[in-house]
Image (spheres, rainbow, N blue to C red):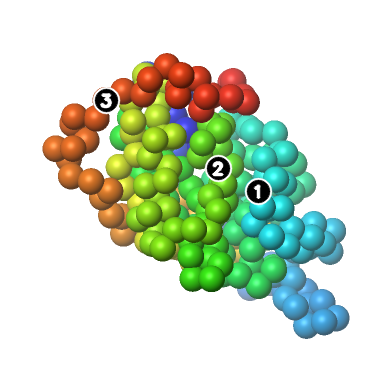
Amino acid sequence: MRLLGADVPSQFDIIAATLRRSCAPVLPSRQTPKRVLRNSHPAFGLTPENLRTLRSLKTPIKIQKFIDALPYQYADTALSPQRALQKRKGHCLEGALLAAAALRVNGQPPLLMDLEAVRDDDHVVALYRERGLWGGIAKSNFAGLRFRAPVYRTLRELALSYFEHYYNLRGERTLRAYSRPVDLAGLDSENWMTSEKDVWCVPERLIAARHYALFPDKVARTLPRLDRRSFEAGMHGRVNH
């Protein structure tokens, strides 16, 4: 999810503006019981078809290819993974939610990290670990803000790997901070995986999470703009409004 320039309203700005709306509480009588597979793996309330789809994405690269194939949409939405699978489309937040859900049904925790920017949208990355090293899965309209192999010792290293690819249409390098991991299991009571309503509680939790600056403000003030060749490379495959 990226800004199209400082003069154009961003999706994440729209989401942030709606944060006064928390996810609607789910009445006990309407709660969806967690389906359980015969082999005792939880289904988290997903339909059998959607559960099969997510469980088939057994590796991070398979998850990335799946969310890459979904059409990118510009919309004021926060679709749950189940709804995104039904609609077969999504933006950065929804892609990260889908990735987190796929990781979860395959045995990993559903972790997200928020990348915070200035004059630009925040970006959301689903986190995974292999052999103690961090990697990332993300959907983006910009080529360089997607998959990261698990080679990063810290989340700061992982976040910095997005720096050169994170820019607005003015060519300004806009990434400034990253959040601690947000475990979406803490939002299970909000049915974040299956809700029929937009799960605004997720961006609420991401924005509220503690963030860490990547470098001092005095460094940010002297950053050069991106060169034209790098700018155009990052725009490869971009979907316009």
Indicate the amino acid at tag 2: Arg
The answer to whether marks 2 and 1 mark residues whose Cβ atoms lie closer than 8 Å is yes
Residue at image mark 3: 224
Q: CA distance from mark 2 to mark 1?
A: 8 Å
Q: Where's residue 108, x and y in %?
A: 61, 70
- Work out how far the residue at label 1 is from the one at label 3, CA to CA, in angstroms: 31 Å
- In this rendering, the answer to whether 200 lies above or below 77 is below
For marks 1 and 3 on the same chain, the one whose residue lies earlier in the sequence: 1
Residue 104, quarter of the rendered image: bottom right
Residue under the point 77% across and 74% down: 35
Q: Classify 100 as above or below 89.
A: below
Which residue is at 69% across, 60% downward?
Answer: 59
Q: Looking at the image, which residue is at 55% across and 33% down? A: 143
Task: Of the two numbered discs 3 and 2 on the same chain, state the one appearing first in sequence.
Answer: 2
- Residue 193 spot, x, y in % from top left: 64, 60
Q: For the residue marked with disc 3, what is the amino acid?
A: Pro
CA separation, marks 3 and 2? 23 Å
Reply above or below: 131 against 174: below
